Amino acid sequence: MDAGNRLFLPTRVGQGMSLTKKSRRGGFGLWCLPSAETGVKLVALLALAAWSSGFAPAGNFADVKPSPQQVEWQDLEFGVIIHFSTNTFLDREWGDGKADPSVFNPTQFDAEQWMQGIQAAGAKYVVLVAKHHDGFCLWPTAQTDYSVKTSPWKNGHGDLVQEVSDAARKHGLKFGVYLSPWDRHEPRYEDSGSYDKYYTEELDELAQNYGDLVEFWLDGAGSAGHVYNFPRMIEELRTYQPNTLVFADTGLFEYGDIRWVGNEQGVIPYENWNVIDRHGYLRWRPVEVDTPLRKAHWFWHPNDESSLKSLPELISTYEKSVGRGGQLMLGLAPDRRGLLPETDVARLREFGAAIHQRYGANLVAQHIPRHSAADRALDGDLDTFWSAPVGSHHSVLEVEFPKPVTFDHAMIMEWLNDGQHVQHFRVEVWDVTDWKVAVEGRAIGHKRIDNFVPVTASRVRLNILASSSEAHIREFQLFSVGGNLNAH
Ligand code: FUL
């Protein structure tokens, strides 16, 4: 084990502790709590590891702020992850690494067609699985022959990463990659040192040849027990891609900029706070929720149309991910032709249209202007925000309408650059003599969507009952959607 490895996982220093694989994704080494006698040693080593890697414990949650890259990424809200490889042709989810490259032969591959569906859904970025666990690479890497280079597709002259990256950018979508650490084909996987070199060189190619990467997926699935030199990998990535956000399980706390939600159902448990604590170290780690468009399948399978998520399921997913302050990552699977199935494209279009229809007509646009700073939370402009009085822990934002409006959804956004502050809020309506509560919640974060029984009023207020510092409200919007799919 070299110095890099020791620094990677403080948990690895506690020899004798047993490995607990908490989840498929978190296989990188999540260890049980230390026993009493190893505890002291562990604390000392943790401190050493933390010091050596430039970590200092933050004082409290409210002091932790996002990086500019995280702020920008959180604004994207919705992305897709694309799985397309030898598995597609063999009816598999996890390839064993023995598939012959000759099976990879899409006859009508068209990245443009993918992007049209993706754009219609309203997604803002695309993450391509450049190599899944079977080790087959979708670009002509110089590190192995196990790639498109030895497949019949375009007579071995194709570069799928290039085509998808070009098409995404052409459509104004950001692009990122997934490069599976677990590799069931590469013989060097048996030897950590030489595999690290192999993986890092693959990563180098992706980081240097395909433009800016918005996100880099570090997936822990299948890696339990394997030792990787993550500091080296991430240093390499950062050399060429200083702004890429690394997605990882909280087991890779030091290296991840974004955290996995812990399920593949498309649900963020509420309350969702951007700052999390791991071993006493507080960091801004916004959450991403990956879930496939076809239930439980990341790759395309024949006769699988019935697993396509329904429109109500997708809307519910949206409201339980984006609507709970997180990022939605929807899994798409092109078929053996190399096209997104028509059924899937139609569903993506319906989904995009439904979100637009639900949240396109903000009733607050009809409010009586207040000619004060409060208008900045009511103007539909994401570049402005209202700030409650400096140092306040309680504040009220009131909206008045020329005539009563009826609404059943509220959407609130915090301006997060200075941290996530709102801890308790109510949306209230004036009812002749008193304020009545339409909905009550705790965390807001990037975006919070609430639904409730319809209310009609000409005075509405966002009552912030508690905030760790003055609240910064980017938007307060109201909608009449009709029909509550998933009341909170
Ligand atoms: C998981 C993998 O094991 C699945 O095959 C898929 O790639 C999903 C997005 O991540 O960990």
Image (cartoon, rainbow, N blue to C red):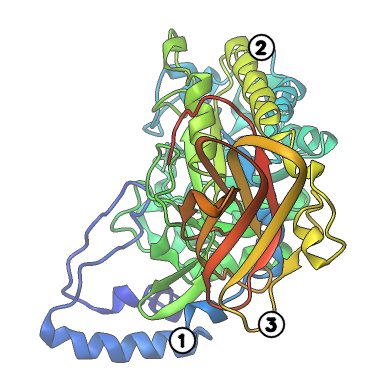
- Provide the secondary structure element on which disc 2 rests: loop
Q: Position of residue 134 (x, y in %)?
A: 44, 36
Check contact, mark 1 vs mark 2: CB within 8 A. no
Q: Amino acid at mark 1?
A: Pro
Image quadrant where residue 115 sits: top right
Q: Quadrant of the N terminus?
A: bottom left
Which mark is on residue 390?
Answer: 3
Closer to the observer: label 3 or label 1? 3
Q: Quadrant of the C terminus?
A: top left
Q: Earlier in the sequence, mark 1 or mark 2?
A: 1
Which mark is on residue 107?
Answer: 2
- State how far apart marks 3 and 1 are (Cα): 26 Å
- Above-or-below relation of 277 to 350: below
Mark 3 surroundings: few (<14), some (14-19) or many (≥20) residues within 10 A:
few
- Above-or-below relation of 391 to 258: below
- Above-or-below relation of 314 to 126: above
Q: Position of residue 219 (x, y in %)?
A: 45, 50
Closer to the observer: label 1 or label 2? 1
Q: Which residue is mark 1?
A: 57
Q: Earlier in the sequence, mark 2 or mark 3?
A: 2
- Provide the secondary structure element on which disc 3 rests: loop
Residue at 61 percent of width and 57 percent of height? 462
Q: Position of residue 349 (x, y in %)?
A: 67, 20
The one nearer the camera, 64 or 308, is: 64
Check contact, mark 3 vs mark 1: CB within 8 A. no
Q: Position of residue 437 (x, y in %)?
A: 49, 51
Q: Amino acid at mark 3?
A: Val
